Amino acid sequence: MQTSISITRGEVLQQMEGYLKENMSTFLKSVEDSWQPADYLPDSRRDTFFDEVKELRERAGSLSYDLLAVLIGDTITEEALPNYEAWFHELDNINRDRNNGWAEWIRGWTAEENRHGDLLNRYLYLSGRVNMREFEVSTQYLINDAFDLGTANDPYRAFVYTSYQEQATNISHRRVGQLARKAGDDQLSKICGMIAGDETRHARVYKAFVSKIFELDPSEMMLAFEDMMRKKIVMPAHYMREMGVEMGKTFGHFTDAAQRLGVYTSNDYTDILDSLIVDWDIANVKDLTGEAEKARDYIMALPNRLRRVADRMPVPKLEYKFKWIS
């Protein structure tokens, strides 16, 4: 049972600020050492530009319909970055002073993520297989419609969410890259691999934040984890839609395509939960209140429940034609 003196979320985040500053060089890559979208695309300054674009288009022509749809949906998700940064700035008790560790992390994370949408957008444009206007409409809708991730303004819940989401995006990008390679598009495979690498590192950082909070405020962190799992982690693009389509409907078709390909499945959702339970050593967290102990019991039992549900879910059939694809 918890016996430690209570601590506020603001005090926890303030204590962690020094930890961020000390480790920022491992959390983020310097601009000088970072890859940029131009590294993976034809250079328009060169005489070989049009030949390289032709080759890119030929390789992109080998991608299956579902794979292209998932790639487009992933890109739209990445392009909605303005929403994600705004969401971060709305979290309670985050010090936004320019030189504060939290503000430095948010800026650096945003800067790294910004490259993902830029790179994928340009690839899709050059591929010649995408109705870019329809794609851009969906991106504008997603930013305009905003989202509700179930975190309210609570940083504890937000870090559970980002720990989960960064792992999910790593899986999705990595598997799209693997399928692209099998289809003969090694360039797209490299693109997805670089993005997945960023997501892996970001997931490691957010998981480290939660681990630190478990040390300082275990009961409140456990309750936040339980609450997010009861609500279920929703993807940031869950309101995704095309022009003339009801909000969220297109996202359902996008996730069906991802499920058919095995890019991101219900089992992946549960596997991520399992990994978080291990990484945060949930079974051995000490000094919990009675309420937090019950929350831990719920979390520990949840993976088996989710797997039973997933085993009964049929694989979605192919039936939807996206407006994004020419």
Image (cartoon, grey):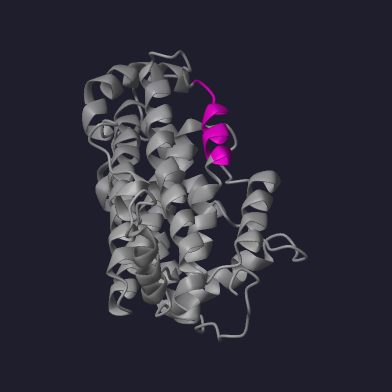
Q: Position of residue 36 (x, y in %)?
A: 33, 43
Between residue 72 and residue 269, name the one nearer to us: 72
- Residue at x-position 60% and y-position 72%: 253
- Residue 202 sits in which quadrant? top left
Between residue 161 and residue 278, name the one nearer to us: 161
- Residue 212 sits in which quadrant? top left
Magenta: main secondary structure equals helix
Residue 291 seen in the figure: no
Q: Which residues are magenta?
A: 82-93
Q: Position of residue 192 (x, y in %)?
A: 34, 59
Residue 181 seen in the figure: yes
Indicate left or right for 76 with 107 as reference. right
- Residue at x-position 68% and y-position 67%: 249
Q: Position of residue 319 (x, y in %)?
A: 62, 85
Q: Identify whether 295 is placed above or below 55.
A: above
Indicate left or right for 6 with 200 as reference. right
Indicate left or right for 270 with 232 as reference. left
Of all residues, the one furthest to the right in this rendering is 244
Between residue 175 and residue 298, name the one nearer to us: 175
